[in-house]
């Protein structure tokens, strides 16, 4: 498909999705929403892709909602309460729903400010690496809104309820070092080194046994909302699957032979 307001490219086992509305600080458009979902569909269907890197073009990761379109009550921001509710459900909510079922690891390379829904998008990813110029804010309350695309869900899981609630209620801007201390990001790197760092991490993940990586991710997210018995039941089921995989046997042979493994995803 033709992607609009994003770029999608594959380099070996890594797919890179780039938000591409730099003139609007990579704020969402209806076309970007549809293209993002389609890009994750493409990455899921491509058996050669093992990891996705998500980043932004220009100096911002994403400003979230397009304030100019909000003021005009146009596009996804048009209509009364029922119509707007439907717009969210059929539009921007398709992004967290799609990412939630995406089996492969997703690394957010936060190249600049991630504000409002932009922060929420970063929090939907599994790992976040930040450039020195990155900034973070759950800024909805500054424009009289609530985190309408799932921020109350994702931010609380990323950094814990008390800290997330404080960020949402105050809309204060979090600098990279604080984001690191909060656990919001895993690393801070120089602006010009961000993509190389993100891709190095992606390549390292891609070198792992693909089935084990996918099921580990699924088990971890399932455990967030499960009791211990359910989490252990799923862990036993997944372990039964991977312990009978060719990649598990290859990993054992490689360790014992003191060589690098070659995984096939089988």
Image: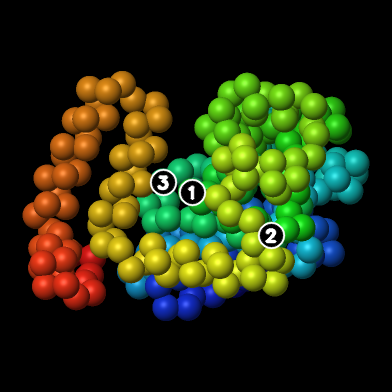
Tell me the number on the disc at residue 126.
Answer: 1
Upstream in sequence: badge 1 or badge 2: 1
Residue that appears at 63% across and 22% down: 162
- Could you give the CA–CA distance between mark 2 and mark 3, rounded to whole angstroms? 27 Å
Q: Are marks 1 and 2 in contact (CB under 8 Å)?
A: no
Closest to the observer, 110 or 252 = 252
Q: Position of residue 239 (x, y in %)?
A: 16, 44
- Could you give the CA–CA distance between mark 1 and mark 2, rounded to whole angstroms? 17 Å
Residue that appears at 59% across and 48% down: 185
Q: Which residue is mark 3?
A: 101
Upstream in sequence: badge 2 or badge 3: 3
Q: Position of residue 202 (x, y in %)?
A: 46, 65
Looking at the rendered image, the quarter that the C terminus falls into is: bottom left
Q: Position of residue 264 (x, y in %)?
A: 22, 71
Q: Nearer the viewer, mark 1 or mark 2?
A: 2
Tell me the number on the disc at residue 131.
Answer: 2
- Local secondary structure at mark 1: loop
């Amino acid at each position: 498909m033709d992607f609009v307001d994003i770029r999608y490219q594959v380099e070996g086992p890594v797919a890179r999705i780039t938000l591409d509305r730099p003139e609007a600080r990579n704020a969402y458009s209806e076309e970007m929403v549809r293209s993002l979902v389609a890009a994750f569909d493409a990455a899921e269907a491509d058996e050669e892709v093992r990891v996705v890197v998500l980043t932004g073009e220009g100096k911002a990761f994403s400003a979230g909602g397009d304030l100019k379109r909000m003021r005009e009550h146009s596009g996804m921001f048009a209509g009364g309460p029922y119509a707007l509710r439907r717009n969210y459900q059929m539009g921007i909510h398709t992004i967290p729903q799609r990412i939630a079922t995406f089996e492969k690891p997703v690394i957010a390379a936060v190249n600049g400010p991630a504000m409002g829904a932009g922060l929420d998008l970063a929090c939907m990813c599994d790992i976040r690496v930040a450039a020195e110029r990155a900034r973070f804010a759950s800024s909805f309350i500054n424009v009289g809104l609530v985190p309408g695309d799932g921020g109350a869900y994702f931010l609380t899981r990323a950094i814990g309820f008390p800290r997330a609630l404080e960020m949402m209620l105050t809309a204060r801007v979090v600098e990279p070092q604080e984001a690191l201390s909060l656990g919001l990001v895993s690393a801070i790197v120089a602006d010009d080194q961000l993509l190389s760092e993100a891709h190095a991490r992606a390549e390292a993940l891609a070198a792992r046994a693909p089935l084990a990586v996918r099921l580990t991710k699924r088990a971890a997210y399932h455990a967030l909302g499960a009791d211990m018995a359910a989490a252990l039941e799923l862990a036993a089921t997944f372990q039964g699957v991977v312990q009978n995989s060719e990649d598990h046997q290859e990993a054992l042979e490689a360790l014992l032979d003191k060589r690098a493994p070659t995984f096939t995803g089988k």
